[in-house]
Amino acid sequence: MDTRGTSLTGRRALVTGASRGIGRAIAVLFAQEGADVAIVARNAEALDEVAAEVRATGAVCVVIPADVTADDAPQRIVDEAIAGLGGLDILVNNAGGNSFMAPLHTMRYSGWQKTMNLNLDSIVRLLQAALPAMIETRHASVINVSSVAGTNGSPFMSHYGAAKAALISLTRSVAVELATEGVRVNALIPGWIDTDLTGFLREDDGVEHAVIDRVPMKRWGKADEIAQGALFLASDASSFMTGQNLVLDGGLTANP
């Protein structure tokens, strides 16, 4: 019987948005499971803290301070990751987020554009930079971190929901394109997770209750719980899985 596990020994992973929250948890867990890791975020000081955790496991860690939305960033990020790791087997497109709520008819278009650039456009450009090298490995995994905001309606966050929905569609299309190239592409879909990026939802008790009351498990998810899903998608445990959504949301999307 084939008992494939979640070891990442010998794998080389690039994780964006790795200075905190879900990205940090993923980077550290991947290292614990044997991967060497390149970590990307804007905050160099915070990245150094994550790098110390990664290196404490014995893994190689390449630190790449960068804003993924900058014009020259995607190719530079990939080049530095490959140079430091010796190749690339796993790409986790985790950088993203949303910092405001507004009805569409009053939303500034600049806010819409900024959200799309961070949550979708930067990922397209990272994929274009990374996929040639990943195809060469014939044994690679791309994990695009989307959100339940992209699977259901997202009132007052249409900008964010639209970007994350587009990322799910992109995941499926690219997965089919690469299915015979040795590259699997899946979407990881967290629900409402207790991180800095969802802090604005907890600033008002009424908003927080409205969010959590719809979650059947009646709590915020944890970054470590999402990291476990990423580990499954990165490893041979999901070797026959591509173009799919792995939803970790406490039952939120099971609601009618």
Image (tube, rainbow, N blue to C red):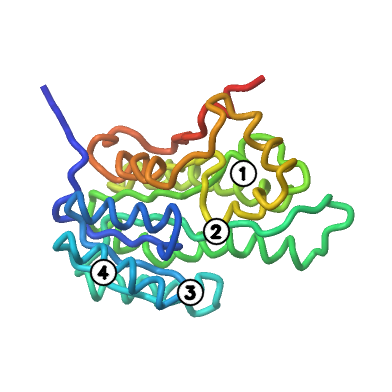
Q: Which mark is residue 42?
A: 3
Q: CA distance from mark 2 to mark 1?
A: 13 Å
Mark 2–mark 1 CB contact (< 8 Å): no
Look at 65% across and 60% down and name the residue there.
116
Q: Earlier in the sequence, mark 2 or mark 1?
A: 2
CB within 8 Å, label 4 to label 2: no
Q: Are marks 1 and 3 in contact (CB under 8 Å)?
A: no
* Label 2 sits on residue: 96
Mark 1 or mark 3, earlier in chain: 3
Residue 209: horizontal and vertical position, in percent? Answer: 68, 36
At label 2, the amino acid type is: Gly
How far apart, in angstroms, are the residues tagged by discs 3 and 4? 17 Å
| Mark sitting on residue 52 | 4
Q: CA distance from mark 1 to mark 3?
A: 25 Å
Q: Which element type, helix, strand or loop, lies under badge 1?
A: helix
Between 119 and 30, the residue placed more toward the observer is 30
Between the C-alphas of marks 3 and 2, the distance is: 12 Å
* Placement of the C terminus among the 4 image quadrants: top right
Q: Which mark is residue 174?
A: none
> Which of disc 2 and disc 4 is earlier in sequence?
4
Q: Disc 3 marks which amino acid?
A: Arg
Q: Earlier in the sequence, mark 3 or mark 2?
A: 3
Helix, strand or loop at disc 2? loop
Sooner in the amino-acid sequence: mark 4 or mark 1 = 4
Please name the amino acid that badge 4 sits on.
Ala
Pointer 1 residue:
165
